Image: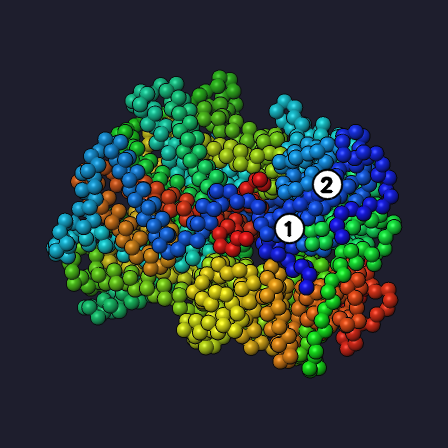
Amino acid sequence: MSSTDTTPAASDDASGDGTDAGGDDSLGRRALARLVDASIFERLGIAVASTLLALLIGLVVVAAAGYDPVLFIDNMVYGIFGTYSVADLFGTNNRLAQTLRPTVTFIITGVAVAIAFRAGVFNIGVQGQFVVGGFAAAATIVSIAGSLPGGAAGGAMVIVVATIAAIAAGGLYAMLPGILKAYAGANEIITTIMLNFVASGVVFWLLDAYFRPGGTFFVRTERFPEHVSFPQPIFEGTSFSVVGLAIALLTAGVVFWIMERTRFGYDLVTSGHQADAASYSGVDAKRTIVATMTFSGMVAGLAGAVYVIMVLSYFSDPATLPTFGFDAIAVSLLAANNPLGVIPAGLLFGGLESGGNFVNQSSDVPRQLIDGVVGLVVLFVAAPELFRMAGKRMDVGGDEQ
Amino acid sequence: MSGTDTDDAGAEGSSTTGEGSSYAAQLSGISKRFGDVVANDDVNLDLERGSVHALLGENGSGKTTLMNVLYGLYEQDEGTVRVDGQVRDFDSPRDAIDAGVGMIHQHFQLVEPMTVLQNVILGTEPTRGGLVDEDAARADVEEICERYGFDVDEELDTPVRELDLGAQQHVEIVKSLYRGAEILVLDEPTAVLTPQEVEGLFEVMAELTASGRSLIFITHKLGEAMEAADEITVLRDGHAVGTVSANATSREELAELMVGREVLFDADDRTTEPGDPVLTIEDLQVIGDRGRPTVRGVDCQIREGEILGVAGVEGNGQSELAESIVGLRSVADGTVTYEGTDITDASRRSLIQDGIAYIPEDRQSEGLVLDYDLERNALLGNQTVEPFVRRGVVDWDAVGDHAESIVEEYDVEPHDTGAMAESLSGGNQQKFVVGREFEHDPRAIVAAHPTRGVDIGSIEFIHDRLREMRDEGLAVLLVSSKLEEIQQLSDRIAVMYEGEFVDVVDPGAVTEQDLGLLMTGNELDDGSEPDSGTTHGNGGDDQ
Amino acid sequence: MSSEDSERGSQSDDGERSTADVVSDAVYDNRWRLFGVVATLLGFVFVAALLTDVPLTKLVDIEFWLGLPYGDVFTVGFAERALQAAMPIALAAIGGLYAEKSGVFNIGLEGFMIFGAVNAAAVSWILAGGSASQLDLWIALVATVLLGLIYTAVFAVLTIRYKADQIVAGLAVWFLGLGFGPFTAVVMWGGVSSPPLSSLDTVTVPVLAEIPVLGRLLFDANPLLWVTIAIVLASYVVLYRTRYGYWIQAAGENPEALDTAGVSVRRVRYAAVMFSGAVAALAGGMLSIGIGNGFTGTGTTMVDGRGWIAIVAYLFGNYNPILTALASLLFGAAQMLRIQLGTIGVDLPSSLLEQFPYVTVIVVLTLVGATRVPSAVGESYESEE
C-alpha cells in the first residue's frame, strides 16, 4: 500500500493540502499546553492563587493608603467568623450568620451564572432576573398573604406560591434574550445588560405606582407578615435562616446533578464545549440556547425569592439592592463554572462581604475596597482561565505530533 | 520519479547567478517537514519569465506548502529560493512582497466593508497632508486596470463585500500589481468562479504574462492546467513527479502523474448480492456555507449490502452531500428517502434514532468532545437511545459499559475509558468514533473520510469493519478523497465533480487514470460502461 | 452576503457624491436602526399616553399631535442640557468605537470613566484644594487622561498579548472602578464623595454668542463642548480618511489582510484601545470637574451607567463617529426630557423614560441581528512567524 494516507499533520488541516498549524513550538505554546491540560486540581490551584493574590494586593493598597493592615486582617477575620474559637462559632455569635447570609444569595446566583456560562451563553443579566424574580415573589406575597390562613402552614404555602412565581418570572425574563439570540442573532451580552437596567427601572416604577403603601415615603412594598418567613432554629433574630442555606446547597446540588446526570444537562454542557459536536449528536442549537437562558433565569429568580423572604421581608428600590448578579459572575468564574464549586466560591464571597462590612464599621477602611478586591479576583482568574481557553482555541495541548 | 523534467522551453543561459536570468523564480531542492510529515521533498520548480506555470496535484500533495515557502510564510528546511536570479531568504510575506512576489490566496485577504480602492492600497496608502490621497492612488489603480483589462476600476468606491467573487479576485490581483508584483501566485483561483469568470481570469492571466509578468497557479483541475498554463509541474505526496510543457502533454499523462501507478486494489470476494434500495436520493440540491450551491442535482440509490463510494477531490460537494443526508444540513431541493420514508427535512436526532449512523469528517470537532473522557464521549449521539438514557436521566453505568465494549471490540488503545479523548492518537480516536457509530445498530452508514489522519493499522481495521457491516446487509455511503480506499471498498464508485455525479462506475472496470480523469471533470473517452441499475448525474464540464 | 445594503445607490451626474447623496445613503444603510428608534419611540409615547390618562382615541387624532406644546418642551435650554448630557457619553462612545473597530471589545468603559472622574477630582484637589483655577482644572484633566492611558495599557496588554477574554477583563475593570474609585475618594477626602470642587467656566464668544439658538448653544458654553466636537470630527476624519483609520478597520475585520499588507496588527490594536481608555478618562473627568462639582461616589458613582450607554451609543451609531455623536445626543435628550416635561406639568415616571435607550438597543439588535460587528472582534490575532 503506498502512502496516499494523509499523515498526522494533515489531520489538523481539513483541506488536506499540507498547510496546518504545525511548526511553531515556542516556549509560550508549551506553557499553554500545560495549562490546557490542567486538571481539576490545577484549576483549583489557579482559583486559590488568584484569590490570595488579589487579597494580598488589597492588603498592600490598604497599607499604602495609610491604614493599619494588621488591624484590617484582624477585622476581616472577626467579621467573617465572629470569634476566634471554633467552639463558639454557632453560639450566640451572629457574625457567622452575617457571613452565611450573603453566601446564600451568592451561591444561588452563582449557580445561575454557571448554568449559562457552562453552556457557552454569556448571561450577564442575572441581576435583572434576580430583581424580577424577587419582585414577583414580593408582589405575590403582598397580594395573597392576607387571604390565606396564618401560622406556619399558611406561611409555607405563601412562600411556595411566591417562589414559584419568582422562578417563573426570572425564567421568562431570561427567555427573552435567549430567544433573541437564538432566532435573531442578537448578542446576548448586550441584551442582558440592557435588560438589567430595564428591570431596575420598570420594577421601580411598579413599586412606586402600585405597591407602595399609601403615605409612605420610601419606595417599597409593605412588610411581609410575620408568618411568611423561614424558620430559624439557630441564629434567631438575624436575617439568616439555615433554611435559606439549605435551599442554596440544594440548588447547587440539583443543578450539578442535572448537568452531570441528565440528557438535558449533557446536551447543555456539550454545547458549551464544542457546538459542532453537540449538533452532530443531535442537539438543536437554538432550542438549547433558549432552554439554557430560561433555566439560568429560573435559578436567578429563585435567588430573588429567597433573598426577599429571608433577608428583606419586603421589596424595595432595585437600585438599593446589592449587585449579587454581577458578583455572581465572579463567583462562577472562580468556580470554573461548576455548580458544586460555586459553594466554596460563594462562601468566599460571603466572607469578603461580611468581613468587609465589619471592617467598614469598626475602622475607616471603606467597604469599596472589597469591591476592588473582587475586581482583582476576576482579573486574575480571567487571565489564567483564559490562558486555558486561549490555549484550546489555538489547538495547543493534547494531540501534538 | 522526482526532479524536473523540463521540456525544451528555452531555458538557455545560466540560471544560478544573477545575470539576466530567464527565470523569474527558481525553487531548488525545496524540502519542508512538519514534525514527521514531509510536505515537500526535494522539489524543483523553475518559473520562466513571462510564462504561466501550473502546479498540479491532489489534496495533500504539497502544492500550497511549496508556494508558502516562496511567499515567505514558511521557511524551508532545505533548498534555495531564487527570485530574479538572486537567492532570497524571506522571513515573512512582507519580504516576499518587497521582492515582487504576490500571492492571491484561496480565501481572499480583503477587508469586506472597505472599498475596492481602499483594499488595494491598504498598507501602502499615499498621503497628502496627513490624509489618504485617494485621488493619487486612483489614478495609479485605474492605470493598472486599463492595462490588464480589469473592470474593477468602475467599482473603486464600492465596498468589496458587494462584489461577486470573480470581481473580488480581480481586486486581489490588482492589489498585488499595485505593490509591484512581478511574480504572481494564484492558489486554486478557479475554485469559487463560474465558468465565465474562469474564462475572464484566463484572459487576465494572458495579459499579465504578455506584459512580462510570471504566474504560478495551483490547481487540481487538469483541464485548466492544460488550457491556461505553458508549463505544468505535477506534485504527488510531496514530490515533484514531472514537469511537462502544456502543449506537449495529454490529460492521460497528467492524470497518471497525479494519481500514480499504485498497487492495484485487491478485489474482495463478495458473498452476497446487494438487495433493495435503502437510501434513495433524487435531484438533491444543497447550498454551501458561502451561499452558493454545492450539490447541484445528485441522483443515486444505495442498496442493502452495498458500499457506494463517492470519489472526488475535496470541495466538490461531497461534504455537503453527506451532511444533508444525515440531517446536519438543510436541503434546498430534491428528496432523500430512507426505507420508504422521506427524511429530507428530518432532524439529526430523529435520524439517529431511525438508524442512520454518521462517521463525521472532522472527528476532533464533531465526532468527539476532546475535553471529555471516552466514557462521556460514548454518550455522544446516544442521548436518546435506551438504555443509556431513560426518561431524561443518564445511566452512566450503561454508558460506561458501552464505552468499554467499544474500546474492546474496536481495538482502541489505551483500553482506558477514563482517558481524555484528546490524548488518543488519531487512529484510536477514529476507531472509537467508528465503533460508537456501528454499535448504534444502524441500517445505513454515512462515512465521511473515515481514515483521514489515521495510521495504517487502524485503517485496515476500519476497512475490515466497513466490509463486515456491508456483508451484514447495511447500506454504506463512503465519501473519501483517497482513491485507493474507494477502489478497495466500494461496490460502485460515484465520482463527484462540482456538485454532480460525473459518472457511477464499476470499480473493476476502470483504471486509476480513468478515475483521475473523472475526478477532474472529464468524461471517459473510451465509453466504459457505467454501472447499471442507477441513474447518474450529468457529466461535468470539461474545464 | 449582507442583505442590508445591496447597492450603494445614489450618485449625481458627475460621479461625485453630494451631501444629499451621502445623507440619503446613510439613511438607507441605517434604515433598520431608524425603524427601531421610531418604533420604540412610538411605543414609549403609547405608554406615556396610558400613564397620563390620555384616551387612546386621541392618539390617532392629528389635531392632538399638532396641538402639543412642543415649543415649551424643546427650548434652547433643553438643547443646552441635552448637549451637556451627551458630551461624556459621546466621548466614551467614540473611544469604545475605535477599540471595537480594531477588534477589541472594551466593555470596561464604565470603569475607566469612574477612574477618570475620581482621578481628575483628586488631581484638582491636590493642586489647589477646593478652589482650583481654570488652569488647575485643565491640568487635572490632562493628568487624568495620562493616568487613564496607564490603566488602559494594562487592560490592553492583558487582552491583546495575553488574550484574556475581553468580556471578563472588561467586567473586571468595571468592578475595579466601582471599588477602587470610591476608595480613592475615601483616601483623598475621607468619604466616597469629594467636597465641592470648582468646575470649568462657561466660555462666551463675543458677537457669535448673539446668534439666536446656535449662539447660545455653541458659543456660550462649556469649553469641553468644543473639545468634544473636535474629537468627534477628528475621529471621523481619522477613521475614514487617514491610513490609520484604514488600518483600524482592517484590524477588526480581517487582521490577516492587514498583516500581509505589512502593518502590525498588534500595534494598531494597542493604539486603538489606549485611545479608548484615554478618552473614557476624559469623559469621566468631564463629569467630575469639567461640568460637575466634584466626584460623587455613592451607589453606582456619578458615572451611573454612562459607560454602558456609551457602548449602546456606538452600537447604535453603527460604528460611525458622527452617528454615534447623534445617538449620544438622542440619549442625552432622553435623559433631560423628563425634567423638561415636568416644567410643563407632565409628570412621567423617569424610571420608565430612562429605559428608552436600552429598549431601543434591544429592538435594534433584534432587527439588525448579528451583522455589522467587525468580524474579528474578540479574536486574538497571531502574526505568522
Which comes before the other along the chain, label 1 or label 2?
A: 2
Q: Residue A380, located in which quarter of the rendered image?
A: top left
Query: Looking at the image, which is closer to me, B525 or B317?
Result: B525
Specify the label residue B438 is tagged with. Answer: none
User: Label 2 belongs to which residue?
Assistant: B27
Q: Relative to B16, is C169 on the left or the right?
A: left
Amino acid type, callout 2? Leu
* Residue B137 drawn above or below residue A358: above
Residue A232 screen position, x and y as percent: 18, 61
How many residues crowd around disc 1 within 10 Å: few (fewer than 14), some, or many (20 or more)? some
Q: Residue at x 54, y 42 (%)?
A: C381
Q: Residues within 10 Å of mark 2 (few under 14, many from 20)?
A: many
Is residue B303 in sight in this rendering? Answer: no
The foreground one among C349 and B140 is B140
- Cα separation between marks 1 and 2: 17 Å
Query: Which one is in front, B79 or B447?
Result: B79
Quadrant of the image containing the N terminus of chain A: bottom right
Question: Which residue is under mark 1?
Answer: B38
Picture layout, residue A107 above or below residue B49: below
Element marked by disc 1: strand
Residue A302, image x, y percentages: 33, 61
Write the residue at 58% across / 41% down: C384
Q: Can you give x and y, in whole percent of width and height, for residue C224 in the image?
A: 45, 26
In this rendering, position of residue A320 left or right of residue C357: left
In the image, A352: left or right of B325? Answer: left
Q: Chain of mark 2?
A: B
Q: Quadrant of residue B466?
A: bottom right
Residue C138 lies, in percent from the top left, at: 40, 22
Residue extending farthest to the top is: C206
Amino acid at pointer 1: Val
Along the line of sight, the residue nearer the viewer: B466 or B399: B466
